[in-house]
Image: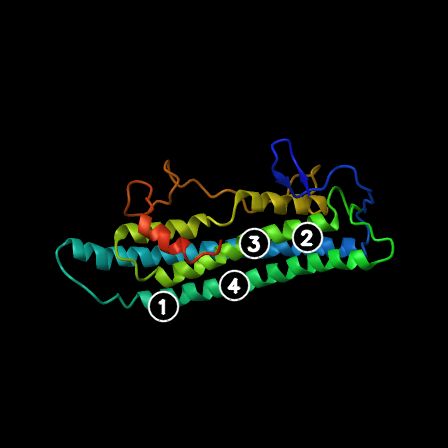
């Protein structure tokens, strides 16, 4: 692992390595395994993004019910302690989404461990060279570091999703409800660097042909308003995160 001019760690090895590029023919051994692993990572993350969109639809419905049938009623001077019955099936559906996300996170974890196992296996092979480039620039260690970094982000985000699932029907005011929806939408633990690492892995393994155009990957979120927060149908401006809400979500998420 090298450092750039600013002292930041880089997940790509220095240029001075032994190059053994593989063409588009039938691959075998480590190159075949790494290329399949990269495709699996991309497919799992695309499925995760689809689940996140599905979950966002459910969270929005829950938020609207809470606002209309609980908070608006309280603002009119009435009191209500019971949660609307419509929330039950929605919470069950959201629980199923989070469970599916958990399954995908487990698959990402297993693939990352497989990459680390390939690195360990290479050390014990006669003449094994840790600096051997498989395709363009990445060694096996680079692949293992990349997949580990990607999985770490999704692992943290899964913990946040579980926290949001527990809190979604029990927010105490309108601001917390809107902030919860923003947390779900923005996926704060999945850094932009995570998608950059995936893009680099796919490009290095030949899944992206730069001459024919890049493969479409999960990218930036759609426009959410001038303030960066998601817009609630009942809200004129971007939502703001209450300090207490951010705290109880952050304390449940891993460091």
Front in this rendered view, residue 112 or 216: 112
Real-space Cα separation, disc 1 to disc 3, in angstroms: 31 Å
Counting residues from the start of the chain, the first of labels 4 and 2 encountered is: 4
Work out how far the residue at label 1 is from the one at label 2, CA to CA, in angstroms.
41 Å
Say which label, 1 or 2, has the lower sequence index. Answer: 1
How far apart are labels 2 and 3 at the CA level? 12 Å
- Whole-percent x, y for residue 42 in the image: 62, 52
Which type of secondary structure does the marked residue at label 1 adopt?
Answer: helix
Residue placed most toward the observer, 118 or 41: 118
Say which mark, if any, is on residue 89.
Answer: 1
Q: CA distance from mark 1 to mark 4?
A: 20 Å
Question: What residue is pinned by disc 3?
Answer: 152
As measured in the structure, the alpha-carbon distance from the residue carrying label 4 to the one carrying label 2 is 21 Å
User: Relative to 130, does residue 51 appear above or below in the rendering?
Assistant: below
Q: Earlier in the sequence, mark 2 or mark 3?
A: 2
What residue lies at 20% left-to-right and 65% top-to-bottom? 81
Taking the spot 39% from the left edge, 55% from the top edge, the residue there is 249
Please name the residue shown 61% across and 35% down the image.
7
Residue that badge 4 annotates: 102
Quarter of the image where one finds residue 13: top right
Whether residue 52 sits left or right of residue 104 in the image: it is left
Q: Image check: 116 left or right of 107?
A: right
Residue 61 falls left or right of residue 83: right
Q: How many marks?
A: 4
Dot 2 falls on a residue whose secondary structure is: helix
Q: Earlier in the sequence, mark 4 or mark 3?
A: 4
Q: Position of residue 172 (x, y in %)?
A: 26, 57
Question: Residue 144's mark?
Answer: 2
Across and down, in percent, residue 83 comes to: 26, 66
């Amino acid at each position: 692992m090298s450092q750039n001019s600013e002292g930041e760690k880089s997940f790509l090895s220095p240029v001075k390595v032994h190059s053994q590029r593989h063409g588009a023919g039938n691959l075998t051994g480590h190159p075949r395994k790494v290329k399949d692993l990269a495709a699996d990572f991309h497919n799992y993350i695309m499925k995760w993004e689809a689940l996140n969109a599905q979950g966002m639809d459910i969270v929005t419905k829950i938020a609207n019910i809470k606002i209309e049938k609980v908070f608006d009623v309280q603002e009119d001077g009435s009191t209500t302690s019971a949660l609307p019955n419509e929330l039950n099936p929605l919470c069950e559906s959201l629980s199923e989404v989070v469970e599916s996300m958990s399954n995908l996170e487990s698959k990402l974890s297993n693939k990352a461990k497989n990459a680390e196992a390939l690195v360990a296996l290479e050390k014990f092979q006669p003449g094994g060279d840790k600096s051997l480039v498989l395709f363009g620039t990445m060694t096996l260690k680079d692949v293992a570091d990349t997949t580990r970094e990607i999985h770490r982000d999704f692992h943290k985000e899964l913990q946040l999703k579980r926290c949001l699932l527990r809190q979604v029907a029990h927010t105490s005011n309108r601001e917390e409800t809107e902030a919860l929806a923003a947390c779900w939408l923005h996926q704060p633990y999945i850094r932009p660097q995570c998608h950059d690492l995936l893009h680099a892995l796919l490009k290095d393994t030949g899944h992206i042909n730069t001459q024919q155009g890049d493969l479409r990957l999960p990218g930036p979120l759609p426009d959410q308003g001038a303030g960066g927060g998601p817009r609630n149908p009942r809200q004129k401006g971007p939502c703001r995160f209450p300090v207490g809400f951010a705290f109880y979500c952050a304390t449940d998420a891993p460091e």
